[in-house]
Amino acid sequence: MITYENVPISKLTTMRLGGPARYVIEIESPQDIIDAYDFVEEFHYRTFILGYGANTIGHDEGFDGVIIKNRILGITKTDLENGAELEIMGGEYWDDVVAFACNNNLTGIEALSKIPGFAGAAPVQNIGAYGQELADTFVSAEVYDTKERQFKTLTKSDMQFSYRHSLLNTSAKGRFFVVSIKLRLTYGQMSRPFYKSIETYLAEHNITDFSPQSIRSIVSAIRADKLPDPLEIASAGSFFKNIYLSREEAEKAEERGYPVHHGQDGHKINSGWLIEQAGFKGQLLHGIRVNEKACLVLINESATSYQDLKKARDEIASTVYDKFGYWLEQEPEELQ
Ligand SMILES: Cc1cc2nc3c(=O)[nH]c(=O)nc-3n(C[C@H](O)[C@H](O)[C@H](O)COP(=O)(O)OP(=O)(O)OC[C@H]3O[C@@H](n4cnc5c(N)ncnc54)[C@H](O)[C@@H]3O)c2cc1C
């Protein structure tokens, strides 16, 4: 277990905002988790579990408590009849997990390539992209229950997965520290129809190889073209969630001429479209740039405080609401 004091949250999160955290504890073994929570209990500190910080926003006043990070590494593959089960320690970088699966010709997570973050955070908001989401292959998570102070297994049904949600960011937010996750993957390839942008890429480049490795390269290329690399550009990825509608709401939206996508996951309007139609595409507001190629992504170009981000967010959300009647919900969590 490694402990640091007074660490700027701006250095721990990809949006690069936020004042100092009193302590940061890096967990390197299950015993470290017990020791860390003993320390927290003894001094009555508040805690926040942090991964890579790609979906978390720091506040200007910092965090007067203990940030606990899972840095336990390792991937174990167990062969099954037509595939394999992977046990992934929570400190693994998610894209390394996808690379491992693709190298082993396993399908199930190749469309989740290049999502920044640690494996331990992947179930929290049920990461998803290009037609796949973590829930599709998820088997279980080994967690430390910080309330009952014991290790437990949470199965897929325990996790209550839905779009960008799970037990871990709703009713049991902050309670379970994810130690590791298990995924079940199969040999083979994704089946058609693929996500529209993948189909377009295949057609434009005349590609007929749908192997996990090939889809990974395609998704990586599409993402590199429109999404900022968090190592170079400060952002938290999609800043707003898409708008999911009931069937009746979707019909009304279509009558008004709004583009509604009907997929297996329901009826949705792309919030990026709403932001673009509201006139924010490429705009700079309080140091925050609305990404030109994907309006859902807000980039911290020159904002110096959380307040700048808050002003930009509220301006975008209220303009979209006034124009369309949909309230945009923020995707990244606030570290508080
Ligand atoms: C450029 C960019 C592109 C992105 N694209 C996508 C995308 O396509 N699809 C998508 O779904 N997301 C996307 N995201 C969001 C982000 O990558 C994911 O949410 C990712 O899972 C965050 O991982 P993290 O380790 O950075 O989590 P953090 O931001 O560190 O934490 C996120 C949440 O998980 C909790 N948490 C973290 N680790 C643990 C743990 N071990 N146990 C319990 N709780 C934990 C935290 O408390 C917090 O609530 C993108 C972000 C960026 C910056």
Image (tube, grey):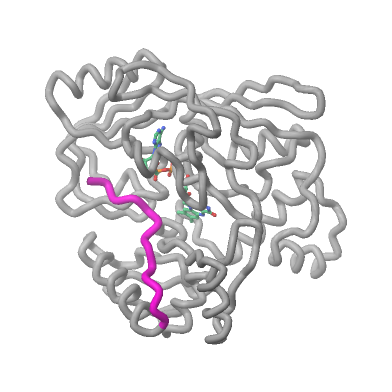
Secondary structure mostly seen in the magenta stretch: loop
Residue furthest to the left: 43
Q: Is 328 drawn above or below residue 75 in the view shown?
A: below
Magenta residues span 324-336
Q: Hey, which quadrant is residue 233 in on the image?
A: bottom left
The residue lying toward the viewer, choosing from 246 and 224, is 246
Residue at point 26% right, 32% down?
Answer: 24
**In the rendering, at what x and y percent does residue 197 appear?**
69, 66
From the image, which quarter does the N terminus lie in? top left
Find out whether residue 123 is within the magenta segment.
no
Q: Is 89 drawn above or below residue 269 in the view shown?
A: above
Residue at point 53% right, 79% down?
Answer: 253
**In the rendering, at what x and y percent does residue 241 appear?**
45, 61
Q: Is 108 drawn above or below residue 215 in the view shown?
A: above
Residue furthest to the front: 248
**In the rendering, at what x and y percent does residue 163 appear?**
51, 52
Q: Hey, which quadrant is residue 136 in on the image?
A: top right
Residue at point 28% right, 24% down?
Answer: 147
Q: Is 177 drawn above or below residue 305 in the view shown?
A: above
Residue 234 shows in this picture: no
Residue 197 placement, left or right of 34: right
Residue 263 shows in this picture: yes
Residue 11 placement, left or right of 185: left
